[in-house]
Amino acid sequence: MFKSLTKDLTGSADICTTAKHFDKLLAAAYLLPGEDVMFAFESAKEEFAFTNEALIVTLGES
């Protein structure tokens, strides 16, 4: 927790961009029937997908 807080405060955190192709998101594998991605942010190590039911966060190192 403190490691990510430190990165945010120093400005070295990943910069997210808006996802343009929802079918290429890693979060698409976790969608339930009837659930749709409304918008998503992605960076090299993180992905935040907001659906009509939930927020799906995918974290990784590569």
Image (cartoon, grey):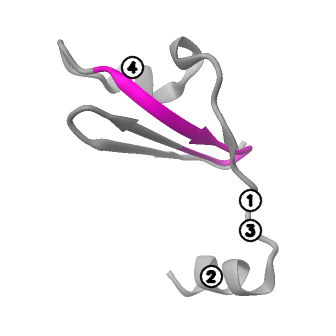
Q: Which residue is mark 2?
A: 3
SS class, disc 3? loop
Identity, as a three-letter code, of the amino acid under mark 2:
Lys
Magenta span contains residue 53:
no
The span from disc 4 to disc 1 (Cα, nearest Å) is: 23 Å
Q: Which residue was labeled with disc 3?
A: 13
Q: Which residues are magenta?
A: 36-47
The image shows residue 53 at horizontal and vertical percentages of: 20, 35
The secondary structure that dominates the magenta segment is: strand
Q: Are marks 3 and 1 in contact (CB under 8 Å)?
A: yes
Please tell me whether mark 4 or mark 1 is closer to you in this view.
Answer: 1
Q: Position of residue 12 (x, y in %)?
A: 81, 73
Q: Answer left or right for 56 relative to 33.
A: right
Picture disc at residue 14: 1
* CA distance separating discs 2 and 3: 10 Å
Q: Amino acid at mark 1?
A: Asp
| Residue drawn at the location 70% of the way across and 45% of the way down | 43
Circle 1 SS class: loop
- Considering only order in the chain, which callout, 1 or 2, is on the residue closer to the N terminus? 2
Structural distance between the alpha carbons of marks 3 and 4:
26 Å
For the residue pair 59 and 11, the one nearer the viewer reads as 11
**CA separation, marks 2 and 1?**
13 Å
Would you identify the image quadrant in which residue 10 lies?
bottom right
Question: Circle 4 sits on which residue?
Answer: 29
* Residue contact between numbered discs 2 and 3, judged by CB atoms under 8 Å: no
- Neighbor class of circle 3 (other Cα within 10 Å; few <14, some 14-19, many 20+) is some
Of callouts 4 and 2, which one flags the residue occurring earlier in the amino acid sequence?
2
Mark 3 and mark 1: Cα distance apart in space: 4 Å
What percent of the width, then of the height, locates residue 25? 54, 24
